[in-house]
Amino acid sequence: IPESVFKIPKNGFINIHPSLLPKYRGPLPDFWQFWNQDSDGGVTVHVVDKGEDTGAILAQVPIRIESGRNIYDYIKECMVKGAREVCRILEEPQPFQTRPQPDDSSFRARKLTDEDVLIDWSWPIERIYHVMTPALSMTEVFREPKFPWNLFSWTPVRFDKKTQQSRLTGELRINGEPQDLLIRNGKAVLQLADGDLIFDHKFRVGKALTVIACFFGEWL
């Protein structure tokens, strides 16, 4: 926001940021907290200044990020608790009580680029599961499965640790990378070094209609 804009209101702008500032300054704090498997989440209400999420802090609420937590539930909790803090702050007499942020620029929660490695397959399976539930969809880290598997959305639901297990055989492969993505009892199974990541699936009506429309478009 240009400085000329946020100086228009007499008492300035207030922002709700889904992290405990100064940690995770930037446009994508929720994703990077999950990517780093940081359990110490939270929400900050702060004054907007000319820096990137550097304004004085009005309120902070810690929020625990459990392993495998749904990222959208976390964002919702941040926004609800942040809005409550804003309402509380606006009822207080002015000038509002603030405290400056510590100087910390160690990690910027930047936007993702096409060059970013979203999953490091050498990670423990617990971290892979945490990042993909559902911070990432399966089609963001794999090539999209071929027909008919591309008509379904796939969501990781659990992981099974293993110490020593032979590779599965005689199962239907759909195409995954860098490990085999198999179908077992109606669920997709991604075999990793220290366990199996289990995916559930739902039929994507919109995707199916698109495929049908393309088919008849070419046939006509």
Image: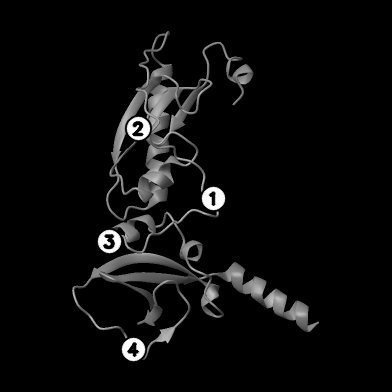
Decide if residue 186 is in sight here.
Answer: no
The extreme bottom residue here reads 170
The residue nearer to you, when weighing 117 against 134, is 117
* Circle 3: element type: loop
What percent of the width, then of the height, locates residue 100? 37, 17
Which disc, if any, is residue 169? 4
- Which badge, 3 or 1, is on the more N-terminal residue? 1
Decide if residue 196 is in sight here.
Answer: yes
Given contact means CB atoms under 8 Å apart, are the residues at marks 4 and 3 in contact? no
What percent of the width, then of the height, locates residue 77? 37, 41
> At label 3, which amino acid type do we have?
Pro
> At label 2, which amino acid type do we have?
Leu
Q: Which of marks 2 and 3 is in front?
A: 3
Label 1: few (<14), some or many (≥20) within 10 Å?
A: few
Q: Which of marks 4 and 1 is in front?
A: 1
Which disc, if any, is residue 177? none
